[in-house]
Image: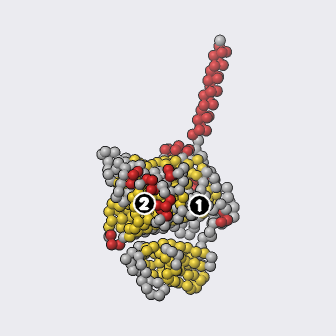
Amino acid sequence: MKNQKIKSIFILIVMFVIFFMMNISMFAETNAELPENFYEYNSGSAENPFMISNLGNLRWLSETEEFWGNDDNQYFFIQTADIDATETKLWNFGSGFSPIGHASITTPPIIVERNDFRGNFNGNNFLISNLYINENSELFVGFFGGIYLADISFLRIENAEIRGYAFIGGIVGQSRESSIRNSSFSGKIYSNNPLDASIAGLIGISDNTIIEFCYSTAILDGNNAATISGLVSVLMRGSLINSYFNGDFVNGSNNHITTTSGLVMMAISTVIENCYVSTTSKQNPNFFGLVGAFQLSVIKNTFWDIETTGLEEPIGIIQGEEWCIVENINGLLSYQMKIQNTFIEFGWDFESIWDIDPENNDGYPFLRTYEPITSTNDFVINPSFMLIGNYPNPFNPETIIKYSIDNPGYVSIDIYNIRGQKVRNLLNSFMDRGEYYLMWNGRDDDGFEVGSAVYFYMMRSGEQVTVRRMVLLK
């Protein structure tokens, strides 16, 4: 009998040890792990970008600020496999994954400390799934907290949960002078600040950023936010083109007023073109189909589903209406939104950009999958010049174009219209190293004034080319 008791106690101890060890392994956090090519020659460059192939590599990037880049160094990253980030819910005592790049605010007084991500991240169309971020007191929260002079492409974030204080976006909290292309987000986004928080399906706040071929199918929770927007909360001096929101809004409670916009809450000096909105949240009386406030901007060939949104009003407030261009924005019935010819009539490209399939995206238009860079040798080498931008943008009648030269050489800068026709040559000369400015007065090579429209300015040196957009508003 005594031996039987001893045996039973021994078995219980063994079972307890096994259970304990299983739980330790279950809750153990993945440590930061250097990319496998970290010690290779020229790693982190355009020719040999750091390879992000697992959760440990992703954690290394989020926690190693010296590789986010600075004025002297830019680093390149390429994702090489799907990454399951479920474990991030256990990280950092419940805070989860640390956003890449950040801006923090301390009060009083208000002090903003920035360390933006300034690199090139190519997600390569691989997934990052089940990501968890819970930054209770932080501004500019997203997978990237803050980016500056960065290029984000082919990033796919799926089934994520992101919570922050204000200016929260699925992809980026704050973007400045950057580009975000061919990227998408699905999951839930919340705020912990009911007074003045803004949440959006892609970007919290954007300044001088190009956003193209992007979409969000997020669930945006307005129970603790002042404004919620399908794609971008504040869009300034940039562009939102060939993108869409097909997600859901959770409206504020009875004692909390939330203003909702299908695409953008506030558009200032920007271009919105070839976009659409569909959502099931039609019960919010403070809901605008496309944009909440619109100023010095262009919106063209953009649509929203009046059945699923329950709205016939696309824009809340238009400020300086004489300086805005509003063309071909239409509320459509659901069946019209699922017919290809509806959009082709207004110039949408269903040959290489858009497609429709009843079995895909609830039958609404979806973006074709662009082929990402699959070889690390295919990265475009960082040019020996930089086309920094133009100001003001939009402009009338003049704008200043700023650019810099790292290596002396012959440089040309030309203006093109939206049809690809050259309008004006501004520069064709040998240039020494330095920073320069050019003025364009809104006239073509023959001296005639050109009309209000979107224009492109292209800087070329040898085989290296950079293009940016600008808007002339008269």
Q: Residue 456, image x and y in percent? A: 50, 75
Distance, label 2 to label 1, CA atoms, is: 23 Å
Q: Residue 440, image x and y in percent? A: 45, 81
Q: Nearer the viewer, residue 132 or 439?
A: 439
Which residue ends up furthest to the right in the rendered image? 40
Point out the tag, 2 or 1, that comes first from the N-terminus: 2
The colour scheme used to paint the residues is secondary structure
Q: The C terminus lies in which quarter of the figure? A: bottom left
Mark 2 highlights which residue?
A: 303
Q: Which residue is at 32% across, 51% downward?
A: 285
Can residue 102 be spotted in the picture? no
Mark 1 highlights which residue?
A: 370
Tag 1: Cα neighbours inside 10 Å, few (<14), some, or many (≥20)? Answer: few
Three-letter amino acid code of the residue under disc 1 = Tyr
Q: Which residue is at 41% across, 80% downward?
A: 398
Q: Residue 111, image x and y in percent? A: 40, 61
Q: Nearer the viewer, mark 2 or mark 1?
A: 2
Q: Which residue is at 49% across, 81% downward?
A: 423
Where is 438 relative to 333, above or below?
Answer: below
Q: Which residue is at 41% across, 54% downward?
A: 333
